[in-house]
Image (spheres, rainbow, N blue to C red):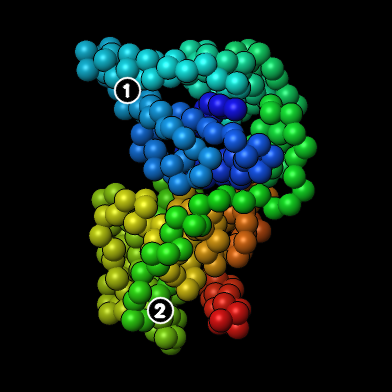
Amino acid sequence: MKILIIKTSSMGDILQSLPALTDAMLVFPEIYFEWVVEEEFAQIPSWHPAVNRIIPIALRRWRKNWFTNIIRKERKKFKTDLQLYSYDAVIDAQGLIKSAALIIRLAKGIKHGGDIYSTREFCASLWYDKRYSIPKKQHAIQRTRMLFAKSLNYNLPTVTGDYSIVHNFSKKIPHDTKQYLVFIHSTTRRNKQWPETQWRKLIHYVQTTEFYVKLPWGNENELLRATRLAQGFSYVEILPKLTLEKIAYILTGARAIISVDTGLSHLAAALNCPNITLYGPTDANLIGVYGKNQIALCSLEKTMYTLLYEEVQQELEKLLYETTSRD
């Protein structure tokens, strides 16, 4: 059985689609998937054992120069790659007009997706051959699992979803002489940022422990933020610019992770890393971290400014005690 998945972005959304593939793989051992995904996230689907081919797309880059010759050639190649095979099912897990109109309509096979009440943009459902009711008041992972179960006609498993990517990284955990924590300190939306003063208080607390801190970053602004957070602390390491795969290895080797609401927090969840994610405006019950060893610390007032470092420190102390006890 050959299935095409449309889930182009974002990093967190792509990671949260993986448990649905695992469900289908366990029901149909011979199934394999091909996946249309934004080029910058193309590594992620390749980590899942049921993904056979990745078809990268560059909508974010193309839309800036849609009609230039080089972009036309790239779009033509994408269409050729997309139409190379006819699929037993084409599942649009994105639920947007752009994914339906620009991608799914070109694909060969019966097209599946949510109905007008279930997609993120209701008009997207007009491009589907089969439409399903997927209740929105449940976690995004459960919604995707339900969409796959209905599209491929199997019973939705009742067990917790499994991302099935840990095996890629568990054998190559970094062997640091001293154990470390990872603080994922930056995200794209300002209202999801935890104040730097709170981060520095938490970093100061780490001085009383046996650990040191690693700070990842993804762009110039995040590097500047990491530099400010590390200033004056000899036990804080600012990591170099890394690929997602290399970051995954570092997360896997961490004793614990503190993160804001960003794609890397979902990567930590997918890797079963002990992780505390800080939430302000996000509804963690619907799109928060999911899986083993995950703690969602939510502001009651829906703002990151009311989350104080003392609360985070207490949760971190408990998490470190629990992981030490398991050892």
Disc 1 target residue: 62
Q: How many circles with numbers are drawn on the protein?
A: 2
176 shown above or below 148: below
Instruction: Locate residue 72, reporting x and y percent.
Output: 28, 13
92 shown above or below 269: above
List the single residue furthest toward the left.
69
119 shown above or below 280: above
Bin the neighbour count of mark 1 within 10 Å (Cα to Cα): few under 14, some 14-19, many 20 and up: some
Q: Quadrant of the N terminus?
A: top right
Q: Are marks 1 and 2 in contact (CB under 8 Å)?
A: no
Instruction: Locate residue 73, reporting x and y percent.
Output: 26, 15
Instruction: Locate residue 65, reporting x and y percent.
Output: 27, 19
Residue at x 35% of width, y 38% of height: 40
Q: Quadrant of the C terminus?
A: bottom right
Residue type, label 1: Trp
User: Which numbered circle lies on residue 179?
Assistant: 2
Q: Nearer the viewer, residue 53 or 307?
A: 53
Instruction: Locate residue 300, reporting x and y percent.
Output: 66, 59
Which of the 4 image quadrants contains residue 42?
Answer: top left
Q: Is residue 20 visible?
A: no
Q: Nearer the viewer, residue 327 or 238?
A: 327
Q: Is residue 210 visible?
A: yes
From mark 1 to mark 2, how far is it between C-alphas? 43 Å
Residue type, label 2: Gln
Bin the neighbour count of mark 2 within 10 Å (Cα to Cα): few under 14, some 14-19, many 20 and up: some
Provide the secondary structure element on which disc 2 rests. loop
91 shown above or below 154: above
